[in-house]
Image (cartoon, rainbow, N blue to C red):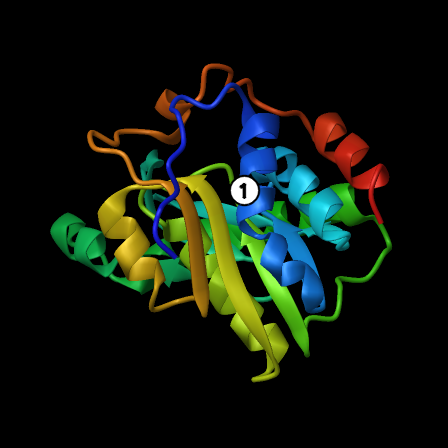
């Protein structure tokens, strides 16, 4: 799908989600399931869930930081999936995936904790046979989106489709994502992309309570 004509910046995640919902309206005829990447993706996914009359759940992901430089992401992991690494970056840093195992183990524990916070004892939704729509508030490098989409593919076991839907993204990342998802829906691919937050007037960080409130309001 080609980017739509939208005015940037978005007012906030709710407005971006409402616009994204209109772009996805044709999927209402299928059997969609909306999976949001917390935390910010949940606020965008909520209007999508409402307009498509589709269930909303989370797909928890975690960034894998470089040993000794945790702010530098060298990969990501999603629940139900395996770690996905930025191989070029690992090579530049002189690292092998084995060197990052302790970090991956810590992030697996944190991922499990967050799943417990957001879902409690409720089981993860069944993805086989579903048209899964993975939603985030934007996409810079696409690391977490890649991990999420690959986890979805594993859980679908060849049955179902995947759509990646974001309000705004970097152009080169969008092209890479077309290899990971059956469909990619992006409202805007602006020049000069540095960070997702630059394309929102209000980009406050959501809390876990914010996420839980949005999930409780929807099936």
Extreme residue toward the bottom, this view: 158
- Kindly tell me whether residue 39 is visible in this rendering: no
| Residue 184 placement, left or right of 19 | left
**Crowding near the residue tagged with mark 1, few <14, some 14–19, many ≥20 C-alpha atoms within 10 Å:** many
| Residue 207 placement, left or right of 143 | right
- Quadrant that contains the N terminus: bottom left
Residue 165 appears at what percent x and percent y?
Answer: 50, 50
Residue 68 appears at what percent x and percent y?
Answer: 31, 37
Residue at 58% across, 44% down: 22
Q: Nearer the viewer, residue 154 or 22?
A: 22
Q: Is residue 149 above or below residue 52?
A: below
Quadrant of res 138: top left
| Residue 14 placement, left or right of 16 | right
Circle 1: element type:
helix
Quadrant of res 183: bottom left
Extreme residue toward the top, this view: 201
Q: Is residue 82 above or below residue 19?
A: below
Q: Which residue is mark 1?
A: 20
Numbered disc total: 1
Q: Is residue 63 above or below residue 31?
A: above
Residue 133 appears at what percent x and percent y?
Answer: 59, 58
Residue at 61% across, 64% down: 132
Residue at 42% across, 58% down: 184
- Kindly tell me whether residue 35 is visible in this rendering: yes
Residue at 50% across, 37% down: 137
Q: Nearer the viewer, residue 187 or 192?
A: 187
């Amino acid at each position: 799908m080609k980017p739509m004509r939208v005015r940037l910046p978005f007012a906030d995640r709710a407005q971006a989600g409402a616009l994204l919902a209109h772009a996805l309206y044709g999927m209402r005829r299928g059997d969609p399931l909306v999976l949001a990447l917390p935390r910010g993706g949940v606020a965008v996914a909520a209007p999508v869930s409402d307009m498509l009359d589709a269930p909303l759940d989370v797909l928890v992901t975690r960034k894998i930081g470089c040993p000794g430089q945790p702010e530098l992401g060298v990969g990501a992991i999603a629940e139900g999936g395996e770690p996905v690494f930025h191989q070029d970056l690992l090579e530049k840093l002189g690292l092998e995936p084995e060197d990052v195992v302790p970090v991956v183990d810590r992030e697996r524990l944190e991922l499990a904790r967050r799943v417990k916070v957001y879902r409690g004892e409720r089981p993860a939704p069944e993805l086989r046979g579903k048209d899964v729509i993975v939603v985030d508030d934007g996409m810079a490098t696409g690391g977490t989106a890649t991990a999420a989409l690959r986890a979805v593919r594993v859980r679908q076991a060849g049955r179902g489709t995947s759509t990646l839907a974001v309000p705004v993204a970097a152009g080169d990342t969008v092209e890479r994502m077309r290899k990971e998802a059956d469909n990619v829906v992006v409202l805007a691919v602006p020049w000069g992309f540095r960070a997702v937050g630059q394309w929102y007037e209000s980009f406050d960080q959501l809390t876990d309570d914010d996420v839980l409130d949005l999930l409780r309001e929807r099936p």
